[in-house]
């Protein structure tokens, strides 16, 4: 008996704030979500390691035009650090390289955390997607090859000890893009003298987007297909930290034709562009007082 044919993929516009489960790659989560929404076009805004859970913003349709805007966004993580065990990946999935007795106390941990606040340098882990001569570092690591990596500057805006359990502890970390929480855990362990690795990680914030607004794949699947679109955030959700430029009908028409309009906003400031019918794209003010379109949606998308 032939299986019923799946309906053709449909246009879906919006942002899904997915609570990614552990053990699933970001791409696998994206493809599952795309299947659940039967969406023509989908993309993500940056990956989470398979070990990690938490906020993974996914873009559908016109929202994919703005996916890169979150790559530079600050992020918040909840991390569990296991003391006394060093692994080759700096997380729980790696091979154990060293074990040490844990003599560090809660007071010791609290004393070292200020050293990891502000601008710090991190050496990227070998098990990462960074490339050397066109090859991902993790590919070289799997071949037993280790190459020198230059330290990178990252910003730790805040780091807070949430709980202490003797051989492991929980942290909340607010940080800039490019921060490796695995490396942070390993570096803290090195300073404490007993080594450490990251045993659990959950992302709770990306820019202005918060885990409280997220939904799981299981929850999506329990809804009938015609009710799932109600879970989507508006297309401009990825730009929520930017100020709004509300255009009149004539200004919106000019912008949608790729033409600039006069504006008194701050030079070099990007803005969300809205016309009478809703969100129309992303613009930027120049030093001469022109608001120029940078990226536009195909048609106006209402956000209410």
Image (cartoon, helix red, strand yellow):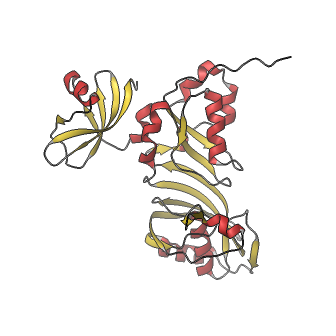
**Residue farthest along the right direction in this orientation:** 1
Q: Indicate the position of residue 185 as horizontal and vertical percent values.
A: 60, 69
- In this view, 107 is above or below 54: below
Query: Residue 60, how many percent across, how many down?
Result: 52, 33
Position in image of residue 300 (x %, y %): 36, 24
- Which quarter of the rendering shows the C terminus? top left
- The residue under the point 46% across, 43% down is 67
Location of residue 285 (image quadrant): top left
Task: Check the image and name the residue furthest to the front.
Answer: 133
In this picture, is 57 found above or below 109? above
Going 16% across and 38% down the picture, which residue do you hit? 263
Instruction: Work out which quarter of the rendered image holds the N terminus and state it.
Output: top right
Quick check: 77 left or right of 68?
right
Residue pictured at 49% horizontal, 75% vertical: 151
Q: Is residue 302 left or right of residue 38?
A: left
Res. 90 visible in picture? no
Closer-to-camera residue (268/136): 136
């Amino acid at each position: 008996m032939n299986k019923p044919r799946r309906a053709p993929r449909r246009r879906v516009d919006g942002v899904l704030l997915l609570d990614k489960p552990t053990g699933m790659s970001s791409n696998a989560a994206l493809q599952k979500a795309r299947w659940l929404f039967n969406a023509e076009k989908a993309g993500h805004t940056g990956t989470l390691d398979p070990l990690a859970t938490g906020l993974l913003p996914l873009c559908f349709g016109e929202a994919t035009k703005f996916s890169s805007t979150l790559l530079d966004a600050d992020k918040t993580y909840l991390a569990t650090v296991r003391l006394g065990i060093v692994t080759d990946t700096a997380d729980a999935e790696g091979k154990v390289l060293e074990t040490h007795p844990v003599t560090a106390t809660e007071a010791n941990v609290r004393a070292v955390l200020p050293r990891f606040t502000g601008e710090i340098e991190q050496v990227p882990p070998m098990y990462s997607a960074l490339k050397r001569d066109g090859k991902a570092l993790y590919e070289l690591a799997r071949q037993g090859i280790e190459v020198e990596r230059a330290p990178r500057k990252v910003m730790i805006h805040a780091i807070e000890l949430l709980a202490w359990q003797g051989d492991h502890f929980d942290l909340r970390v607010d940080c800039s893009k490019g921060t490796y929480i695995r490396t942070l855990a390993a570096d803290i362990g090195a300073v404490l003298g007993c080594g450490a690795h990251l045993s659990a990680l959950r992302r709770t914030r990306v820019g202005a987007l918060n885990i409280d607004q997220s939904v799981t794949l299981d929850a999506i699947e329990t809804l009938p297909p015609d009710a799932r679109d109600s879970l989507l955030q508006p297309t401009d959700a990825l730009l929520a930290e930017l100020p709004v430029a509300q255009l009149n009908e004539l200004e919106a028409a000019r912008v949608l034709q790729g033409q600039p309009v006069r504006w008194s906003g701050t030079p070099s400031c990007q803005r969300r562009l809205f016309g009478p019918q809703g969100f129309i794209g992303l613009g930027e003010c120049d030093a001469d007082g022109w608001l120029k379109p940078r990226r536009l949606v195909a048609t106006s998308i209402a956000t209410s």
